[in-house]
Image: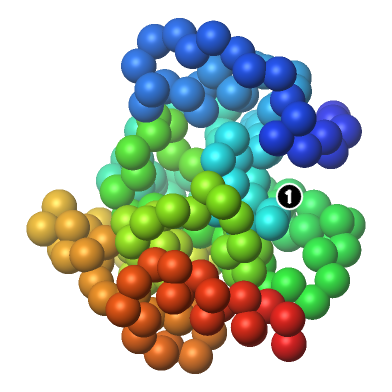
Amino acid sequence: MKRAGCASVATLPAKRPTGHWSQGLLQSMSDPSMIVMSDDRMVMIRDKYPKARHHYLVLPHTDISSLKALSVSHLPLLKHMLQVATDFVTELAVHKLAVRYGLHAQPSMARLHMHVVSQDFDSGCLKHKKHWNSFTTEFFIDAQSIISSLEEKGSVEVFDKATCDSLLKMPLRCHVCGEEQSNFPKLKAHTKQHNTK
């Protein structure tokens, strides 16, 4: 397994974008400055716009378009992706920060990808309700749940667009204590209190 250095995304040189923005992850998969580690089955990259102190993406080399495209044949790959991610977090020694591994129910970027994201959500790139709810509601599906669904049912049940839209529009709630906040600045101030405990 190849492992790259851990330079901050903020210090990486800007690259001229090519193609549609939704193809950005495919470009990052071949950008050495973004790659954290890789093997013959997957690539782990830094999220270019991290929503937490630690935010990485794990993408398969196999072109899997979405959760709907998953089948039992993908189980070894998904388990490998999850194992690589959990091993990486263990080695990273993220101290007491909780980390979740999961996929968005309706991703905006091409190629199936698993988020590895610490639960501090302390980032200037986390700017609005849609960002927040995409990681703190049922819109964010735990990787292990997807694996279990494939093992038990042979497929993954996917939310329809209306359900996804409603999840992204849910009231702002703290992911730790569940307290509702009236606006995003108040939510960020509130969650920082949890991060200092």
In this view, the residue in front, 173 or 84, is: 173
Q: Quadrant of residue 146?
A: bottom left
Disc tally is: 1
Q: Is residue 63 above or below residue 18?
A: below
Taking the view exactly as shown, the residue that stands out farthest to the left is 162
On screen, residue 119 versus residue 90, left or right, reads left
Badge 1 density bin: few <14, some 14–19, many ≥20, Cα 10 Å: many
Q: Is residue 31 above or below residue 81?
A: above
Image point (61%, 69%), residue name: 119
Q: Position of residue 100 (x, y in %)?
A: 59, 66
- Would residue 108 be seen by someone viewing this image from the given angle? yes
Q: Position of residue 73 (x, y in %)?
A: 46, 44
Q: Position of residue 68 (x, y in %)?
A: 28, 46
In this view, the residue in front, 156 or 169, is: 169
Q: Colour scheme of this structure image?
A: rainbow
Q: Position of residue 44 (x, y in %)?
A: 68, 38
Image point (80%, 52%), residue name: 88
Q: Quadrant of residue 23?
A: top left
Image point (61%, 24%), residue name: 29
- Residue labelled with disc 1: 84
On screen, residue 67 versus residue 38, left or right, reads left
Which quadrant: the C terminus?
A: bottom right
Image point (64%, 46%), residue name: 56
Which amino acid type corresponds to the residue marked 1 in the rendered image?
A: Val
At mark 1, the secondary structure is helix
Q: Is residue 142 above or below residue 51?
A: below
Which quadrant: the N terminus?
A: top right
In this view, the residue in front, 11 or 62, is: 11
